[in-house]
Image (tube, rainbow, N blue to C red):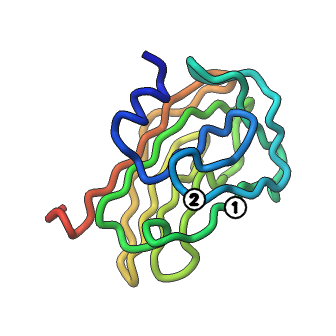
Amino acid sequence: MAYIDDILALSPDHVWTFDGGFTDSVGTANGTNTGFVTNTPPLCEGASNSSSSNNVGDRVTIPATADIEVTYNRKALGGWIRVDSLQLPPKSIYREGTTGNQFNIIMWAGNNLMLDLVAGTVVLQAYSDNVFKPNRTYHVFAKVEGTGFDD
């Protein structure tokens, strides 16, 4: 079974494969590409290519919906990542929200990951002790249960 089959079996609200495009294949929050290249070698089984970025201004903008950019009453995010060198911190891998509520996955302190959650005035941060080695593919997954499920 391919990785995407496992994801779809969970009935997600949104899926972006970054496999040559930024369309939400199960929802309506299609991404807008600014600077990403989409004809790079695949990082996971079942993909025909991947997306890569090498500039600070590169991003995929995903529109806010009722379940994106809200409080964290159940959120999971996963994907594959590969870096080609030691990254100068901070590098945003995923960022949702602007002020008040934020859900961020950041490359921090010498290729370590940090999950950064902001809910109003409360800031929670979790740091990985695994250093991402250049030119190696890693699976990243972050899950927040939120106050709706008694943390």
Say which label, 1 or 2, has the lower sequence index: 2
- For the residue pair 133 and 150, the one nearer the viewer reads as 150
Residue 96 vertical position relative to residue 11 in the rendered view, above or below: below
Q: Is residue 26 left or right of residue 52?
A: left
**Element under disc 1:** strand
Q: Position of residue 92 (x, y in %)?
A: 63, 55
The spot of residue 126 in percent (x, y) is: 38, 54
Image disc number at residue 61: 1
Q: Is residue 150 left or right of residue 53?
A: left
Image: 134 above or below 11: above
Q: Is residue 58 left or right of residue 96?
A: right
Residue at horizontal 14 percent and vertical 65 percent from the top: 150
Which of the two marks, 1 or 2, is nearer to us in this view? Answer: 2
Say if mark 1 contacts mark 2, CB within 8 Å. Answer: no
Q: Evaluate whether residue 113 shows in this view.
A: yes
Q: Which residue is mark 2?
A: 28
Q: CA distance from mark 1 to mark 2?
A: 13 Å
Left or right of 146, for residue 131: right
Q: Nearer the viewer, residue 72 or 132?
A: 72
Q: Position of residue 91 (x, y in %)?
A: 66, 52
Question: Does residue 90 appear in the picture of this structure?
Answer: no
Residue at x 58%, y 54% (from the top left corner):
94
Which amino acid type corresponds to the residue marked 1 in the rendered image?
A: Thr
Question: Which quarter shows the N terminus?
Answer: top left
Residue 14: x and y, percent? 49, 51
Whether 15 is drawn above or below 90: the answer is above
